[in-house]
Image (cartoon, helix red, strand yellow):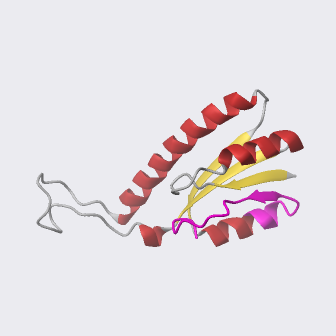
Amino acid sequence: MKTIIISDINGKSESIIPYGLTLAKMLESEVDVIHAIDSRLHQGEYSSLSDSQSITPGKTFSHEEIMQREKDKVQIQLDKLLSSEASRLNYPIKINTLVEKDSIINSISSKIKEEPSSIFVISIEPDGYIF
């Protein structure tokens, strides 16, 4: 059995990740933290070529570069949060992080197929970013 936490670090409310880690400690289970990046939310950004609001010139990013930058940014945030929360638990827990470019529904569906007996920990407050 695994505890699968759906990351909500970009949300406006307090993250569910500390609660999920505590639950996994009590259940003595392995943890997967999933952060799905929906490509529909990251289509493009302002640049000196696309608007008159930019002051400094810069190059425009391709869609793949935008998605990679978002994945790197989220991975850094997750690593920082997980390292601090895991050290507070004072328990050797195995945490796997997965930052993927997919919809949250596809991510959950694939995890259910892999581990049917998993427990999912999801924030109760939808923030418009995850759902």
- Residue 111 appears at what percent x and percent y? 75, 62
State left or right for residue 89 relative to residue 15: right
Question: Can residue 9 be spotted in the picture?
Answer: yes
- Residue 29 appears at what percent x and percent y? 85, 44
State left or right for residue 4 relative to residue 85: right
Question: Which residue is found at the position 29% from the left and 64% from the top?
Answer: 45
Question: Which residue is found at the position 74% from the left and 43% from the top?
Answer: 21
Q: Which residues are magenta?
A: 111-131
**Observer-nearest of 131 and 72:** 131
Q: Does residue 114 show up magenta in the picture?
A: yes
Residue 92 image-quadrant placement? top right
Quadrant holding the C terminus: bottom right
- Residue 22 appears at what percent x and percent y? 77, 41
Q: Is residue 127 above or below residue 76?
A: below
- Residue 102 appears at what percent x and percent y? 57, 67
Q: Is residue 76 above or below residue 62?
A: above
State left or right for residue 38 relative to residue 107: left
